[in-house]
């Protein structure tokens, strides 16, 4: 009996067998994983050939690719954007996009929101949801979709496209482009060099709309945009002479350089209402008129470079949390050709101050009480009015920017308290029936802090409400938006 018990319970024999087999088991598992890795397809192979390469093309550029929802990745070098990605947003300066086996390029301005759709009918297709982009197409292999129409630039064409909540715009600086209505209610049209076309959201409800009647010569406005200035749009139009186009019983005179020269100057750095982290900033700009002999910044003379058509004022001191910079351009006789005000904010007040007097900054944790909608006071809110002002407050030092239905409130001052949005039936931001509004608040690192849901019910026979109607006085003011 003793011998039988020892045979089955010997720890030496069992332990020795297990130690002998264990290395073979581990080696087999590793071999299986290696073979699986070598012969299985890569995670990105299926998307090769269907992506857009995105590059932050300036040191100050801040570019994000959103994978899904609010999940995003900031890119600092050339990165692919696939059709499965949600969107691309440029938070600062500019981004450049290119395509495989193509010389065409896309330049996306600040606040630009773009999505890569796919390669359709041998044409790379993207959509522009907000702000401006410039397309430089060497061959006609790109389609850009806006909210109200699509654009197919021709060979060797340069266009600037702009999209906001209600209007889609195209400005042709070189070549030509075909514009087509999504709804097919009106025929497509060709927009040529020196022309522009704007289609409002409400225009598409008109079944008799003809795009041809919407074409006009380029306005002086386009010469003040960042993309036009940064990409030497003036040189593209310098060869244009006074030209006339006739359409729908009207005749227009084309843009000439002498007419455009009266625009004056444009500030390129810093951007209006931008936030600076330092106590000083250099002010740079472009000169758009040969008549300008002197430029002053807060009555102090800037350096002019007439050959490069630029000017510079170094080390402008920023005093306080907000600085208004007054710029003026003079001709040789001292007459003012152009003037304006540039507002710049600092992330902190400059200068020496008592620590006991520093403003208190509310930090995390935060709650829904920090994100209040003050007006209207009812949610949902029933009304018969065509314009409703949604007004809110946040705690100071918390919110960097706010979006309403994914539209960023451009007049909201970063880290300030007051904001407002106008729901306007005429602009298409409010319609008859139920109108939901998603209000999102973002922090200093562009993280989503909180979301409000607000609903307006537009009724024809609703009781007359006593809410105050927005006036011109109530619309203006620091930190209050005029959006919508």
Image (cartoon, rainbow, N blue to C red):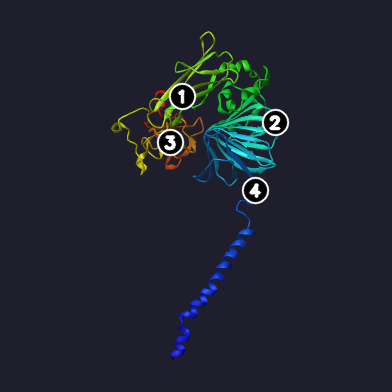
In space, the residues marked 2 and 1 are separated at their CA atoms by 41 Å
The answer to which quarter of the image holds residue 401 is top left
Q: Nearer the viewer, mark 1 or mark 3?
A: 1
Reading the chain from its start, which is encountered first: label 2 or label 1? 2
> Which residue matches tag 1?
315
Q: Nearer the viewer, mark 1 or mark 4?
A: 1
For residue 156, which numbered disc appears in the image? 2
In space, the residues marked 4 and 2 are separated at their CA atoms by 27 Å
Residue 471 seen in this snapshot: no
> For the view shown, which residue lies furthest in the top direction?
333
Reading the chain from its start, which is encountered first: label 2 or label 3? 2
Reading the chain from its start, which is encountered first: label 1 or label 4? 4
Disc 1 packing (10 Å; few <14; some 14–19; many ≥20)? few
Q: Mark 2 and mark 4 in contact (Cβ < 8 Å)?
A: no
Task: Give the camera-side residue of 78 and 219.
Answer: 78
Disc 3 packing (10 Å; few <14; some 14–19; many ≥20)? some
Regarding mark 2 in the picture, which secondary structure is present there?
Answer: loop
Seen in the picture, residue 465 relative to 237 is either above or below; the reply is below
Q: Position of residue 327 (x, y in %)?
A: 48, 18
In space, the residues marked 1 and 3 are separated at their CA atoms by 26 Å
Reading the chain from its start, which is encountered first: label 4 or label 2? 4
> For the view shown, which residue lies furthest in the left direction?
356
For residue 48, which numbered disc appears in the image? 4
Regarding mark 3 in the picture, which secondary structure is present there?
Answer: loop
Reading the chain from its start, which is encountered first: label 1 or label 3? 1
Count of marks placed on residues:
4
> Which residue matches tag 3?
400
In space, the residues marked 1 and 4 are separated at their CA atoms by 47 Å
Task: Give the camera-side residue of 130 and 322.
Answer: 322
Regarding mark 4 in the picture, which secondary structure is present there?
Answer: loop
Disc 4 packing (10 Å; few <14; some 14–19; many ≥20)? few
């Amino acid at each position: 009996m003793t011998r039988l018990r020892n045979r089955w319970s010997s720890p030496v024999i069992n332990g020795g067998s297990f130690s002998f087999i264990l290395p073979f088991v581990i080696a087999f598992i590793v071999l299986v994983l290696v073979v699986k890795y070598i012969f299985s397809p890569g995670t990105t192979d299926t998307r090769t050939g269907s992506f857009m390469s995105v590059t932050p093309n300036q040191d100050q550029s801040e570019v994000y690719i959103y994978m899904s929802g609010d999940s995003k990745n900031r890119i600092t070098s050339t990165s692919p954007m696939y059709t499965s990605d949600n969107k691309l947003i440029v938070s600062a300066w500019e981004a450049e996009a290119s395509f495989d086996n193509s010389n065409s390029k896309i330049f996306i301005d600040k606040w630009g929101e773009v999505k890569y759709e796919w390669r359709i009918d041998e044409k790379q297709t993207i959509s522009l949801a907000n702000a401006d982009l410039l397309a430089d197409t060497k061959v006609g292999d790109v389609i850009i979709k806006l909210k109200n129409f699509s654009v197919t630039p021709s060979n060797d064409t340069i266009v600037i496209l702009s999209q906001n909540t209600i209007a889609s715009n195209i400005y042709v600086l070189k070549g030509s482009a075909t514009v087509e209505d999504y709804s097919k209610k009106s025929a497509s049209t060709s927009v040529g060099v020196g022309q522009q076309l704007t289609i409002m959201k409400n225009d598409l409800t008109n079944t008799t709309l003809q795009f041809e009647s919407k074409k006009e010569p380029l306005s002086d406005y386009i010469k003040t945009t960042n993309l036009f200035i940064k990409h030497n749009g003036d040189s593209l139009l310098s060869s244009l002479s006074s030209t006339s186009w006739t359409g729908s019983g009207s005749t227009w005179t084309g843009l000439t350089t002498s007419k455009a020269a009266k625009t004056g100057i444009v500030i390129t750095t810093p951007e209006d209402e931008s936030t600076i982290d330092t106590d000083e900033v250099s002010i740079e700009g472009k000169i758009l008129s040969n008549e300008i002999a002197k430029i002053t910044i807060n009555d102090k003379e800037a350096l002019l470079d007439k050959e490069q058509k630029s000017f510079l004022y170094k080390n402008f001191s920023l005093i306080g949390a907000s600085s208004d910079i007054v710029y003026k351009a003079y001709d040789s006789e001292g007459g003012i050709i152009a003037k304006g005000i540039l507002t710049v904010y600092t992330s902190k007040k400059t200068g020496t101050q008592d620590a006991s007097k520093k403003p208190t900054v509310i930090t995390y944790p935060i709650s829904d009480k920090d994100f209040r909608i003050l007006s209207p006071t009812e949610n949902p809110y029933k009304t018969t009015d065509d314009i409703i002002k949604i007004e809110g407050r946040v705690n100071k030092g918390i919110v960097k920017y706010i979006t309403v239905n994914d539209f960023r409130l451009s007049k909201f001052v970063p880290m300030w308290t007051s904001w407002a949005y106008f729901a306007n039936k005429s602009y298409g931001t409010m319609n008859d029936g139920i109108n939901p509004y998603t209000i999102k608040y973002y922090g200093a690192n562009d993280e989503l802090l909180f979301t409000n849901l607000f609903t307006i019910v537009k009724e024809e026979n609703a009781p007359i409400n006593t809410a105050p109607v927005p006036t011109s006085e109530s619309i203006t003011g620091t930190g209050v938006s005029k959006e919508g």
